[in-house]
Amino acid sequence: MQHAGLRERFYRRDRRSARAARRFAVGVLEQWGLAGRTEEVALCVSELVTNALLHGVPPGRGLLLRMRYGDGVLRVEVHDSGPGRPRIREGSGDAEGGRGLPLVAALGDRWGVDPRPGAPGKAVWCEWDEAG
């Protein structure tokens, strides 16, 4: 049986938000019966939220984590109001940063960046097919 759902939560620009978002995502997956994806989804949520906090959330603002599930597709979106468009950087394997998006690309079936019509910023997302 396919369950459809939408859950979202707003987080402040705070270093503890990535951990809180990861816990929220794990709880949502459990509610939806998608525990088989917990580790990879939690890791992607953590990476996307951390990237937004470091590069996309201006001071005094926050971010929105949105999770959707329906028709066998799980989608995770992180919305922020900052400028710029994240991309996978070419670089040295020993660089301290730049590993988040390649990890998201490797763990998810798809990922991308969409503008937020009528609002500043962007939504960075990843999806998994047959999420159960």
Image (cartoon, rainbow, N blue to C red):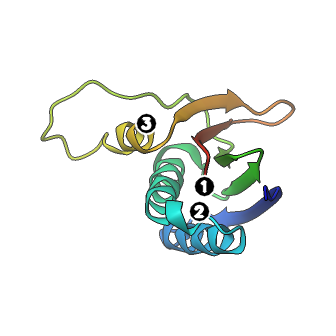
- Residue 77 placed where, x, y %? 66, 47
**Real-space Cα distance between discs 3 and 1?**
28 Å
Q: Nearer the viewer, mark 3 or mark 1?
A: 3
* Side of 117 relative to 49 (left or right): right
Residue 58 falls left or right of residue 2: left
Whole-percent x, y for residue 8 in the image: 76, 61
**Residue annotated with mark 1:** 59
Q: Position of residue 101 (x, y in %)?
A: 41, 39
Residue drawn at x 74%, y 52% is 69
**Which residue position is annotated with label 2?**
13
The kind of residue on which mark 1 rests is Pro
Q: Earlier in the sequence, mark 2 or mark 3?
A: 2
| Residue at the disc numbered 3 | 105
Pointer 2 with pointer 1, Cβ within 8 A:
yes
The disc labelled 3 sits on which kind of residue? Answer: Ala
Q: Which mark is residue 37?
A: none
Name the residue located 68 percent from the left edge and 29 percent from the top edge: 114
